[in-house]
Amino acid sequence: MSRLEECFNVQDFVAAARSRLPAPLFHYMEGGAEDELTLRANSGAFARYDLVPHYLHDIRKVDMRRTVFGCPLEWPLLLSPTGLTRVFHPAGELAVAEEAARAGIGYCLSTMATTSIEAVSQRCTGPKIYQLYLLNDDGLNLHMIDRCKAAGFDAICLTVDTIVAGNRERDLRHGLTVPPRLNSKNFWSFAQRPRWCLDYLAGGGFSLPNVPTPDGGDLGTLAAFFAAKMEQNITWARIERLMKHWGKPFVIKGLQSIANARDAVAAGVSGIIVSNHGGRQLDGTAATVDLIADIVDAVGDQLEVVLDGGVRRGSHIVKALAMGARACMVGRPYLYGLAGFGQPGVQRVLSLLRQETARTLALLGCANLDEISRQHITVAGKLPQFLTATAQPDASHTLLRSVK
Ligand SMILES: Cc1cc2nc3c(=O)[nH]c(=O)nc-3n(C[C@H](O)[C@H](O)[C@H](O)COP(=O)(O)O)c2cc1C
């Protein structure tokens, strides 16, 4: 297994996570739905865009501060909500929230978290967002919102792309259960990771303290939970009632169309997170970086638009900002760090991403986030003007297609 100091980018942490986690848990984290087309597209599509530097600007100080969804950020990143975080490492959500605060960015706690709203609030001094899954009982939904109010959360983010569970075949293949339990399919995977098993047992097991079930705790499989509790008829009227009850920034995560973005404006939400759930829900949807510019053009002057999915480099963050995103979110990258090395792993992942973002901005000639624009981005493999302006349209099409 690699050492922490030998991890120099997000990808390096994937190997560390794989070597520490039992296979069912690694694949639960890493995998996507069905053929994983969307999962791969999310990261891959960033290569479709080239950066265009404009030098001879004063970049002695690069200021990356920005307020997003009412949260003041030192640099434009929020940590996406991820359920079941303590199965990856007993330090769990508290370690991630603490590192987000240390890095000066926002943390989003999942409804499916293994740490309570109240515990995160006590430990996390930075901006905090609660990710709400709408349950089919508004009493329970309002109860979660009231707990967030009491705990001083800054914003609520409603995830709308999980009305049914995505078809994640890696979970079936590897015998994933929630909570983790031994079975004939996964026995050897756990037996090969004794350190994880000891940590998990010493870490006090598993609960979902934000899901207001009568008995808390064991919910059987995730699929059973989704089937039993998840609201499958989320309406804008319902969202408006929840927003009113909350009274602070309220954002929607999981939108991918201009029509939905316009509806969000009409409903008066503060922002949207363009997301396909990291390719874990509907496979065959577009990479979010390919959607963001058109959505920003349609609604960006009326609400904040944030990109989520596939971000693995500071240069990805900068490309999204150049398209018009207010900020980006990452899910798996901090989980790789957590699974591989616990809290120090999260710290290093965030520190590397921050350095990459600042370096990319400086190399583009941008001293602050207002200076980054579409002048700094172009399609990858763009042909020189003398070819595109004259008689060779076929050659240009062929070449453009080959970089996809
Ligand atoms: C292990 C795991 C658990 C997740 N759990 C949730 C969740 O509880 N709620 C939610 O809105 N999104 C959840 N997501 C999706 C993330 O919030 C985010 O959309 C996705 O990870 C972004 O893609 P990335 O991992 O490529 O950064 C989860 C993602 C992962 C990898």
Image (spheres, rainbow, N blue to C red):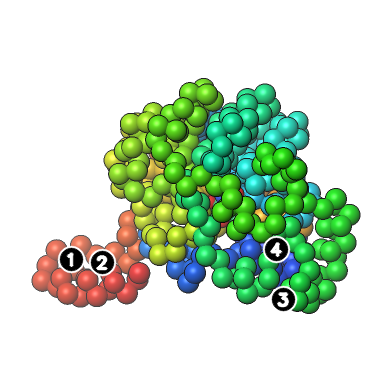
Left or right, residue 15 beside residue 35: right
If you read the primary sequence from the N terminus, does the residue marked by circle 1 or circle 2 appear first? 2
Instruction: Tell me, yes or no, whether the two marked residues, 3 and 1, touch with CB atoms within 8 Å.
Output: no
Say which of marks 3 and 2 sits in front.
3
Q: Categorize mark 2 by other alpha carbons within 10 Å: few (<14), some (14-19), many (20+).
A: some
Say which residue label 1 marks. Answer: 388
Q: Where is residue 263 in the image (x, y as percent from the top left)?
A: 33, 37
Left or right, residue 199 beside residue 114: right
Q: Could you tell me the amino acid type at mark 3?
A: Lys
Mark number, residue 177: 4
If you read the primary sequence from the N terminus, does the residue marked by circle 1 or circle 4 appear first? 4
Q: Which residue lies furthest to the left in this view?
A: 391
Figure quadrant of the C terminus: bottom left
Figure quadrant of the N terminus: bottom right
Q: Is 127 rendered above or below residue 383?
A: above
Say which residue label 3 marks. Answer: 185
Instruction: Tell me, yes or no, whether the two marked residues, 1 and 2, touch with CB atoms within 8 Å.
Output: yes
Say which residue label 2 marks. Answer: 383
| Residue at the (83%, 57%) spot, across then down | 200
Q: From mark 3 to mark 1, how far is it between C-alphas?
A: 56 Å
Q: Could you tell me the amino acid type at mark 2?
A: Leu
Q: From mark 2 to mark 4, how far is it between C-alphas?
A: 51 Å
Q: From mark 1 to mark 2, how far is it between C-alphas?
A: 7 Å
Left or right, residue 169 beside residue 90: left
Q: Is 378 rendered above or below residue 70?
A: below
